[in-house]
């Protein structure tokens, strides 16, 4: 397997290349290193190589790994990219700096309550069920405006939209659709693109790419 620091610089080089083709600034694209399933020993080399923004998909796993890493390393920013159960909202708000999976009214309520209780509001993305695949989570496209309205009412800082396109299909049309829905709703951040398609996502406006296996190797 290639060295984590080498993998990291390759991914940043690819981001810069894609940004250049799209006539965008590489600094407008945030790389989230998705460290789910990987232990602290696999994460530390990336931190040492300068990476500070990470993503996890499960609250409990993140609680087990990250407090210790944050104690020894400064300025870590941790993003939640997986589905969030309402009863874990408070734990999530305590640990994460950004939540990419706001997808339903009950979670708006739970997050608003957690924000108030903890006196801390973290930026959120509304996750859109862009391929209309029920099992994947995400707000149905037709319900996005209403959910955004409810989030606004509840004082939840929604900064953009997030999606996971259907597996094994060309992702570009889905990225383009997410960008259009965001623009229609006055949002300018787009969390889209993973190891296999982050360059395509950048061409279509991604501001946050979520890259796991290209940095850490395959998950077992
Ligand atoms: C695991 C995961 C990723 C990273 O996937 P890779 O293909 O390993 O880059 C990105 N986004 C979400 C929501 C994930 O769960």
Image (tube, rainbow, N blue to C red):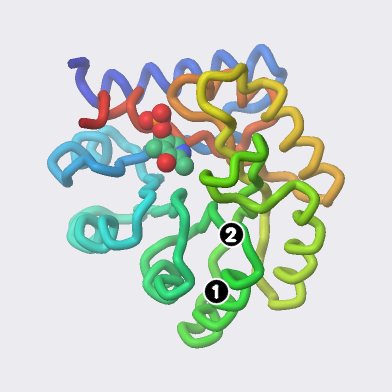
Sort mark 2 into few (<14), some (14-19) or many (20+) by Cα contacts within 10 Å: many
- Residue appearing at x 65%, y 46% in the figure: 128
Q: Nearer the viewer, residue 208 or 91?
A: 91
Outermost residue on the front side: it is 134
Sort mark 1 into few (<14), some (14-19) or many (20+) by Cα contacts within 10 Å: many
Q: Nearer the viewer, residue 209 or 171?
A: 171
The correct choice, above or below, for 119 with respect to 95 in the image is: below
Q: Quadrant of the C terminus?
A: top left
Q: Residue 13's x, y, as percent? A: 46, 17
Location of mark 2 (residue): 102
Instruction: Residue 111: give its label.
Output: 1
Q: Residue 177's x, y, as percent? A: 76, 32
Element assignment for label 1: helix
Element assignment for label 2: strand
Would you say 87 lies left or right of 133 here? left
Question: Which picture quadrant has residue 188?
Answer: top right
Outermost residue on the bottom side: it is 117
How many numbered discs?
A: 2
């Amino acid at each position: 397997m290639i060295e984590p620091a080498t993998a990291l610089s390759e991914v940043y080089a690819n981001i810069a290349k894609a940004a250049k083709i799209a006539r965008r600034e590489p600094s407008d694209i945030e790389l989230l290193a998705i460290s789910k399933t990987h232990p602290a020993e696999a994460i530390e080399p990336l931190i040492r190589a300068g990476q500070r923004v990470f993503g996890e998909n499960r609250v409990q796993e993140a609680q087990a790994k990250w407090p210790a890493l944050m104690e020894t390393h400064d300025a870590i920013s941790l993003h939640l990219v997986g589905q969030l159960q309402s009863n874990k909202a408070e734990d999530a708000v305590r640990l994460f700096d950004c939540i990419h999976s706001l997808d339903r009214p009950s979670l708006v309520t739970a997050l608003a309550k957690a924000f108030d209780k903890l006196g801390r509001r973290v930026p959120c993305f509304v996750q859109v069920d862009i391929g209309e695949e029920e099992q994947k989570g995400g707000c149905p496209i037709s319900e996005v405006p209403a959910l955004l309205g409810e989030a606004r009412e509840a004082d939840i800082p929604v900064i953009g939209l997030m999606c996971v396109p259907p597996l094994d299909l060309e992702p570009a049309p889905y990225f383009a659709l997410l960008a259009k829905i965001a623009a229609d709703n006055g949002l300018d951040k787009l969390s889209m693109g993973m190891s296999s398609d982050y360059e395509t996502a950048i061409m279509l406006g991604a501001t946050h790419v979520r890259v796991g296996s290209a940095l850490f190797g395959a998950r077992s």
